[in-house]
Amino acid sequence: MVLSTNLQSTLLRHQRSIDTALRTMLSAVATASGGAALDAYYGQMQYHLGWVDAQLAPTRSNPGKLLRPTLLLLAYEAVGAWGLAGMAEEEDTGYLQRAMPAAVSVELTHNFSLIHDDIEDGDTERRHRPTMWKVWGIPQAINTGDGMFGLARYALWGVLEHDVEGDIAARLGVVLDQTVLEIAEGQYLDISFEQRQDISVSMYIDMIGRKTAALMRGSAKMGAMIGTRDANAIQRLASFGQAIGIAFQVRDDLLGVWATSAELGKTQAGDVYRRKKSLPILHALEHANPHDLQALQAIYQQEGPITSAQVEQVLDIFTRTQTQAYCRNFLQQQCDAAYEALNNVPQVTSPVSARAINDMKTMVQYIEAATH
């Protein structure tokens, strides 16, 4: 996605710290594994993370946005960072170390799910490079994804080395496990929807709430848990993560149909050409008149590719069902829920906390721009 300057600044704030922690973690585990026989195994993980090329030589590939670990660290800061930020000197980020193992954990969790998603969806490219399974084959990619999931779980226990109390660490493990289960549930639903013609808007929202929003909610909740024992603050930030997770997906759904090529960097109305069962088509199917419903069903079920004329026909039906207005209104509701959650996080007198809340509002503002 094309990022605004403000959001880029927010995501860059902790990017180097997160990247360093990820590399340190993976290097330590690879070294401890003992023996050159496994170099290529951990090299495959590094390839997926964008650190090396297919020959396992260092490269400057796009490492991704690191959105989820950034959200975790912002939630940690928003609740006061366990009081550690107030003791830090200006520009000193040492207080982040308490939460950094969890940040590494959620980023590895996200990436293990992407490795498996690429296999399940048959995607041959990610971030403008061949996907892992395309380079090394499906069996090795599945196994490497499994290894990255194990590494994500292992990384989380690093919080114990940074003075996180045992009971908090255990509850972090519960949240992570629940989150991974929800992601898998969402992926199951998403795959099953491909062969079904009876998918409702509410079923779709439930699916993205699991597949897409669960890790955003889990990241924000875990960051807050490491930063405070205030249950109200933790719940507010979890609610923020859920709302923004759904909002990010709905924003993509809107842009996948109505964004210009320059805005999206992809084919205009690309989701229609791909017959993607995103929020717009599901809303239109529920609200189309009988004639339009029959046309939509015929177009989306035909064997051959959709033509440009058929795309225009679909867009005309979207206009008659007021689908774009519905999607924008729904997106605004999610943004409003995110703002409400942030506004009700108990205030902490700390410049770091205030900046973190501000950064999270910047995330919402970036998404909210798609409602106009």
Image (cartoon, rainbow, N blue to C red):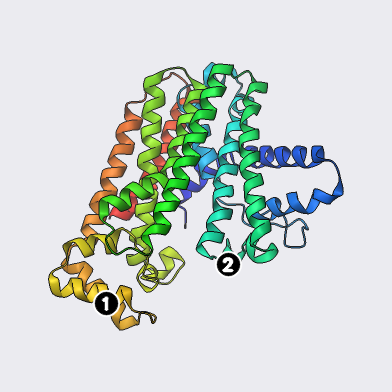
**Relative to the observer, which residue lies in front, 3 or 288?**
288
* Residue 199 placement (x, y as % from top left): 29, 58
Q: Tell me the residue that label 2 is attached to.
A: 124
Q: Residue furthest right?
A: 35
Query: Mark 1 touching mark 2, by CB under 8 A?
Result: no
Which mark sits nearer the N-terminus, 1 or 2? 2
* Residue 167 placement (x, y as % from top left): 54, 17
* Residue 233 placement (x, y as % from top left): 39, 23
Asked if residue 3 lies left or right of residue 323, the reply is: right
Nearer the observer: mark 1 or 2; the answer is: 1
- Neighbours of disc 2 within 10 Å: few (<14), some (14-19), many (20+): some
Q: Residue at x 66, y 39 (%)?
A: 151
Is 360 situated above or below 3?
above
Look at the numbered disc 1 and give the secondary structure of its residue. Answer: helix
What is the three-letter code of the residue carrying label 2? Thr
Q: Residue at x 53, y 43 (%)?
A: 11
What is the three-letter code of the residue carrying label 1? Ala
* Residue 319 placement (x, y as % from top left): 20, 68
Is 245 situated above or below 309?
above
**Relative to the observer, which residue lies in front, 155 or 331?**
155
Quadrant of the frame with the C terminus:
bottom left
Is 289 situated above or below 172?
below
Residue 370's image quarter?
bottom left
- Neighbours of disc 1 within 10 Å: few (<14), some (14-19), many (20+): few
Give residue 298's mark.
1
The answer to whether residue 49 shows anywhere in this view is: no
The answer to whether residue 186 shows anywhere in this view is: yes
Look at the numbered disc 2 and give the secondary structure of its residue. Answer: loop
> Count the marks: how many?
2
Q: Residue at x 31, y 49 (%)?
A: 205
Asked if residue 296 lies left or right of residue 101, the reply is: left
